[in-house]
Image (cartoon, rainbow, N blue to C red):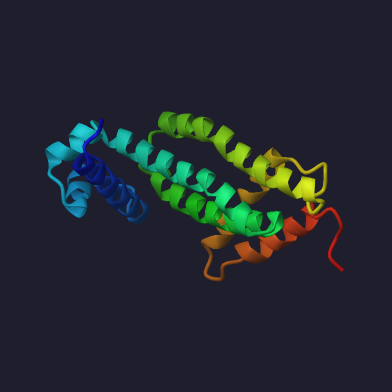
Amino acid sequence: MVRSDARENRSRILAAAREAFTEDGATSMNQVAQRAGVGAGTLYRNFPTREALVLAVYQDEVERITGAVSGLLADRSPLEALRLWTLDLVEAMRRKHGLGDALSPTAHQAITEQTYGPVVAAITDLFDAGKKGGSIRPDADAGDFLQLTGALWRAASTPVDRAPHMLDLILDGLRATPRS
């Protein structure tokens, strides 16, 4: 059993690292420790290498995003849940770009492969709810949708954020019956 103070330290380290790596992919481990308010020993006990820390931040973000699906579906229609979830994913993809700068190409490829399945499964859950209710067309494919959303994080990084408008166009194509 992990002690509560150890869990809190790990959470603070992950939060500090997420912010730091998003701002500057070259942030050092010592800078992360200072930002988290922990000693270097605590940081290295939790994350023995910089790459281990970056991978943990990335994995934590994917778990947060994929875990949000059921709550969104409980409160919203499937299309609105998909819209909100996708905007969150787009923001995470934008931040991931900064994290990617902190990873070796091999680690970047590994984490992409590791997280693809859970992200597609989350999209599939959203699609299935919409297909069941008749709001999402039956031939909609989660993998296709994920590829389409890949362009949205770039649009979110421009001076005028075009991602919400572009997403609305994509969602209109998913509707079982087009809006009039």
Task: Please tell me which residue is depicted at 21% across the width and 37% down the height of the picture.
Answer: 3
| Residue 68 percent across, percent down from the top left | 53, 49
| Residue 25 percent across, percent down from the top left | 34, 48
Residue sitting nearer the eye, 119 or 77: 77
Task: Please tell me which residue is depicted at 47% across the width and 41% down the height of the picture.
Answer: 63
Q: Residue furthest bottom?
A: 160
How many numbered marks appear? 0
Residue sitting nearer the eye, 150 or 73: 73
Q: Quadrant of the C terminus?
A: bottom right
Vertical position of residue 170 compared to residue 70: above or below: below
Task: Please tell me which residue is depicted at 24% across the width and 46% down the height of the picture.
Answer: 8
Task: Please tell me which residue is depicted at 70% across the width and 62% down the height of the picture.
Answer: 168
**Horizontal side of residue 120 vs 46, given as left or right:** right
Q: Quadrant of the N terminus?
A: top left
Residue sitting nearer the eye, 1 or 15: 1
Residue sitting nearer the eye, 14 or 90: 14
Vertical position of residue 94 compared to residue 115: above or below: below
| Residue 21 percent across, percent down from the top left | 33, 50
Vertical position of residue 21 compared to residue 76: above or below: above
**Horizontal side of residue 116 vs 134, given as left or right:** left
| Residue 165 percent across, percent down from the top left | 67, 66
